[in-house]
Structures are given as structure tokens and as C-alpha cells.
Amino acid sequence: ATPLAVASGIKEAASRGIVIASEAVFEAVPDVDVVVFDKTGTLTDGDMAVLRVVGDDETAAVAAAAALERFSAHPLATAVVEAAEARIEAADATAAIPDVSADDVTVHDRGVSGEVGDERGRVVVGHPSLLRDEGVTLAPAHETAVEAARDEGAVPVVVGWGGRSRAVLVVGDEPREAWNDVVAAVADGGRREVVVLTGDSERAARRFRDHPDVTDVFAGVPPEAKAETVERLRARGTVAMVGDGSNDAPALAAADIGIALGTGTDIAGDAADAVLVGRDIDAIPEVFSLSTGVNRRIR
Ligand code: ADP
Ligand code: MG
């Protein structure tokens, strides 16, 4: 290896907001056969917003949800907290949204649970399957709202307590503008496979299937199973995983090369070989071209 080529590659990358944590990036990236993209916050815009709330007492539901989502770094959590804050600001009467606090909070891979206020007891917010696992039954109207959200490519965040769902917060989850071009660039005319991996539903991931360079879409993969899926994909060759900062750390570590979006927590950064700081997936083609350039000089 020529240390000079590596050092200047690291410097060049850093100037573009790409932090190279492991020199293995330069060696391995040009040989990558499969590029795996996480969906939420990676292929889609991390800047999500609550589009609407379906429920009888929206105000109480949003307040309870936000009290718990404050403890999560997930992009969905940020959207819920912002929605609650916007409602507080919009309310001209005295605090239409009670600023409730939470106790005994557990941050799950699919949402958050905890004690909110005195009379509600344990509140659960997150993926419908998390609510079911925590003993909260979805009301028929809320099941309908969940399906409707998925049909439009949005993410349903359900909140419930006392065994019953109380509201569905429909969170918009739009693909990043650059996603089509980024996928085409890394696929490099079919030289590489591109896989989309998501804990979200099949329908929410459907829009990514139509891209000619996307070879597989794995939906409904819970966060804890993502690493396993990446591990299995390694049978197809060298795997690069691109994930967001909040709960993809095991999947990033399981890949030959892990590339993390530097938003949110830095936990995923520890598991990553490259971190995109202040950049999003539009930097991925640069990671590939830069690595190819350095590689040519060190081989
Ligand atoms: P993706 O695989 O698409 O990136 P994640 O693995 O981050 O999605 O999360 C899977 C699903 O779990 C999300 O689609 C969402 O339904 C739910 N989820 C995860 N964290 C939260 C949270 N803090 N609040 C609400 N829902 C959540
Ligand atoms: Mg994610």
C-alpha cells in the first residue's frame, strides 16, 4: 500500500463530508457486489412530518406519544415531537397540549413505551406490531388508518394505552430526490446488485421496486433481523450497507463495508467504516469513485 495515496484519499473524502473510519473502505469498495440501502431515513428524507392524526382525542394522543418519542433518536420520533410542539404553538388557549412527562421509559427497535401521566398507565407508541406485542389492540378505525397510510407510502405510528389504540399518526416518508440517480450510479450498469432493506411494510417499500437497478426489496425485516439479512447477502459477494444513524448499527457492522448517515446518534458511527457528515446518500457515488481512484494507486 502507498500510505500517501490513502492519506490524500482520506483528506479528499473529509473535505466532502465523508469521514473514512477504516482504510478498508478504499480496498473493498471498488470490489463491492451488493449495495444494501436501509429505507427510512436513508433512501427517504430524514426530515419527516406528521401529515394527519386519526383518533378521538388527537390532542391527548399526540401529547402522550411525544412524551415518549422524546427518548428516541429515530427520524419518526423527531417528527412526532415536532408535531406536538407545533400544536402547542398553534393553541391560543392555555396549553391545549399538556406538557406531560414520562417515567420508566423503554426505547424499543419499533417504538417507545413508558408511564405517561397518572391516569393512563403504560403508553406504547410505534409500529402496529409493537403495540400488539405490548398488549394493545388496534381499533378497527385505526387498522383502516394504518392500511391507508401504507397505501400512500406513509408510515403509521400508533399510540395506545389501557389495552386500546387511541390514535394513528400518519407520518410522511418521501424518497430523497437523488435516490434514483444514486441507485443507478452504484449499480454501474448492472455490475452491482442493489437491495432495499426495511422494517416497514411491503407496500411502503413498493415504490423502490420499480427502479430497474433494484434487484431485491426485503420488507418487514425488524431491526434486530437486519444484520442477519446482511450476513446472508454476503453469500452473493462483498456487501456494502448504507444505513441511518439510529438503529442500523448491527447491520452496518455485519456488512463488509458499513456506511452511516451521520445524523442522530453516533452509535452507528462506531459500527461504520465511513460516515457521511452533513451529507446524505448523494455522497455515495463519491465514496465509490474516490475509492476506485485511491485503489488504482495502491494496488
Ligand atoms: P427502516 O427499516 O425502514 O429504516 P426502522 O428499522 O428504523 O425502519 O424501523 C422499523 C419500523 O419500526 C418503522 O417503520 C416504524 O414503524 C417503527 N419504529 C421504529 N422506531 C420508532 C419510533 N421511535 N417511533 C415510532 N415508530 C418507530
Ligand atoms: Mg432505519
Image: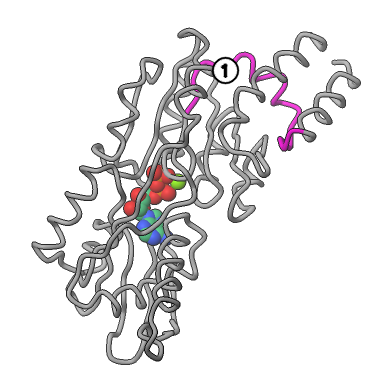
Left or right position of 245 against 117: right
Q: How many marks?
A: 1
Residue 21 is inside the magenta segment: yes
Instruction: Give coordinates of residue 266: x percent, y percent.
Output: 64, 53
Q: Is residue 250 above or below residue 27?
A: below
Residue drawn 86% across the image and 18% down it:
5
Query: Helix or strand or loop: what does disc 1 sit on?
Result: loop
Q: Is residue 288 magenta?
A: no
Left/right placement of residue 231 relative to residue 55 reads right
Residue tagged by mark 1?
A: 32
Q: Amino acid at mark 1?
A: Val
- Quadrant location, the N terminus: top right
Q: Residues within 10 Å of mark 1 (few under 14, many from 20)?
A: some
Residue range of the region highlighted in magenta in the rendering: 16-36
Q: Quadrant of residue 133?
A: bottom left
Is residue 279 or residue 192 the one in the foreground?
279
Quadrant of image for the C terminus: top right
Residue 169, position in %: x, y? Answer: 29, 62
Residue 250 horizontal/vertical position (percent):
52, 44
Q: Which residue is pictured at 36% across the width and 59% down the height?
A: 50
Q: Please tell me which residue is depicted at 45% across the width and 77% down the height of the picture.
A: 89
Report whether 62 appears left or right of 163: right
Where is residue 292 shown, x and y percent of the image?
70, 14
Residue 110 showing in the rendered view? no
Is 229 above or below relative to 294? below
Q: Residue at x 68, y 43 (%)?
A: 277
The colouring scheme, among rainbow, by chain, secondary structure or one colour, is one colour
- Residue positioned most to the left: 140
Instruction: Report the front residue among 153 and 219.
Output: 153
Disc 1 C-beta below 8 A from ligand 2: no
